[in-house]
Amino acid sequence: MTVPELSPQAKTLKRVLAIARFNGWSVIVIAGLGVMVTLLLGDLVGTFIGVLAAAAGWMEVRGHRMLRRRDPAGMTWLVRSQLFLLSVILVYCVTRLGSFDADTAMASLTPDMEALLKEAGLARGDILPLVRTTFLATYLTFAVVSIIYQGGMALYYRSKTRLVTAALAVTPRPPTQSVY
């Protein structure tokens, strides 16, 4: 006996479910690890950002579960989870970009690093422009990659809403459990 071919709508639903589950749990795990590290370091702002990122992952997992229960509103949760996570990341990047402190950066040079600088014939002040450029490039890259990935995921989920809704309409809802 052969298995019937899935419709394009059903294939899309299956793909969206797989992506949402993997992506949502990945965000929760990574953000959770980040929360633990920032708590150990005493970084309350980083902890708060991690909790917000984990909440975005939870939103995506919730959207996945809603779709599994044949609730098309789950697609809205998927789109919003990506936009929420993108907002959290961008706010974090902007606040970090505005917080560069040359004194703190230079104070973190270890004696070994300073010895290497002397061997290379460089003074502490010579590397400050490089440190500043690296700092800016890091957070700008993080912001751009997030816009591409989270923005792309939001657009992907939004573009699949019609097909997923059609797949949910064709497939019957599971019977609700009676409380009697």
Image (cartoon, helix red, strand yellow):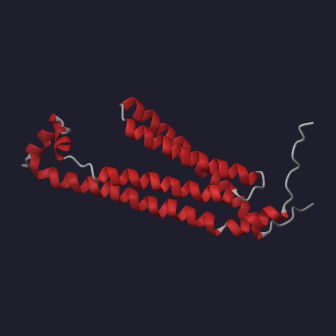
Residue 89 picture location, percent across and down: 43, 52
In this rendering, position of residue 140 left or right of residue 4: left
Residue 22 picture location, percent across and down: 62, 50
Residue 72 picture location, percent across and down: 73, 59
Q: Residue at 51% across / 59% down in the picture?
A: 150
Q: Residue at 48% across / 37% down in the picture?
A: 33
Picture layout, residue 150 above or below residue 112: below
In this rendering, position of residue 51 left or right of residue 14: left
In this rendering, position of residue 171 left or right of residue 103: right
Which corner quadrant holds the C terminus? Answer: top right
Which corner quadrant holds the N terminus? Answer: bottom right
Residue 167 picture location, percent across and down: 78, 64
Picture layout, residue 35 above or below residue 127: above
Considering every residue shown, the one lying at the far front of the view is 180
Camera-nearest residue between 15 and 111: 15
Picture layout, residue 180 above or below residue 11: above
Q: Residue at 56% across / 61% down in the picture?
A: 153
